[in-house]
Amino acid sequence: MKNLGCIAAVLSCALFGAAFAHAAEPARTADIAKRGLKPADFPRWKQLVPNVYAYEDLLSSAGVTFTTNSLIVATTDGLVLVDGQDDPERGKVLVESLKKISPQPLKYVVVASDHVDHVGANGVLKQAYPGAVFISSPASLKTMTDQKRDVLPTETVADKRSLKVGATELQILNIGRGHTGGDLVVYLPESKVLFMSELYLHHVFPAMITAYPSEWVATIKKAQAMDVSWYVAGHGFIDDMATMKADLNESLKATEQVIAEAKRLKAAGQPCESEKNCPAFAQANLGPYAEMTLSASQAPRALARVYMELEGKLPK
Ligand SMILES: [Zn+2]
């Protein structure tokens, strides 16, 4: 039977050449091991368009190792970094990498996500580049002040700010809340690259511990309506343009599914008071999104957060 199965598989592949093309597509996962990669392969960065790089370093959670991503824009008048990394150790590696990319000083750091895995290395960045100006949303400045982060942004963007650095224009935009409540995105109008930070988790289950679930859906739809070539995610691999665009829709659908399931389960009287006390989780139908990286650890948190929203208990 086993051999027959193999023969059938070979025949179907031979008959449908597209099956081979499909097999060559990147594995639908954020887990580095499932992509055949090792920690020694990181950090790594790739040029998306001339002088714009997606930088990936590693983070582990719930036994899974995946990437945390930064955007680096190199200009003739300095570097711009959007989102840092987790801790001083990764900060030192990031500084070494920035120096390999360009001898120019780091001029701006945009805090698009205020979560520790994106700001924990900022002290090291500030030490290496004392002139760097840190920018966040007003909401993220408040969060970081409350959390006593070592580097606090000195400038904020509530809605929109255009930065011209060298010949490159960058737009720092608030297109709505989603993952942190202080979410910002950075758009490069010339190349149409959009760095979405944690508003886009690529093949990572919607992580909602501080999220505004239904606003997140609206914010992703806003991003989808923009004129974008390359959607860049805050976690998960940065694949080719077409894959990143298609998978943003997968991310949207996953978020919608979590919300729909939470509504259904709540209406059915299934409790979910917190991630640790969420009997509803066992009844949740997460469809294909149950296969996403970190689903086991993030799904109960996400359900609990949607319950909070349904009960009007989210922070303002
Ligand atoms: Zn993160």
Image (spheres, helix red, strand yellow):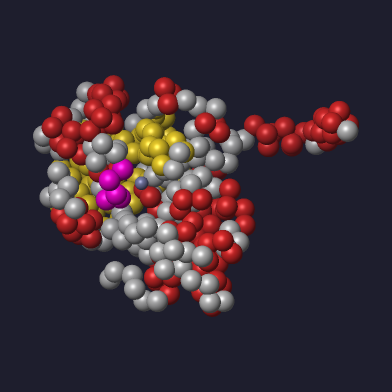
Residue 50, position in %: x, y? 38, 31
Is 177 or 91 nearer to us in this picture? 91
Residue 238 visible within the image: no
Q: Is residue 118 above or below residue 224?
A: above
Give, as a single range, the part of the protein colored magenta: 113-117
Residue displayed at 31% across by 43% down? 117
Quadrant containing the C terminus in the rendered view: bottom left
Is 210 or 237 nearer to us in this picture? 210
Magenta-highlighted stretch: main secondary structure? Answer: loop
Residue displayed at 49% across by 56% down? 299
- Residue 115 falls within the magenta-colored stretch: yes
Residue 37, position in %: x, y? 50, 27
The answer to which image quadrant residue 72 occupies is top left
Is 266 or 218 nearer to us in this picture? 266
Is 105 or 93 nearer to us in this picture? 93
Residue 312 lies left or right of residue 121; in this view the side is right
Residue 28, position in %: x, y? 58, 41
Q: Is residue 36 above or below residue 239?
A: above
Q: Is residue 221 above or below residue 65?
A: below
Residue displayed at 28% across by 31% down? 90
Residue 208, position in %: x, y? 40, 58
Q: Is residue 262 above or below residue 101?
A: below
Residue displayed at 26% across by 61% down? 159
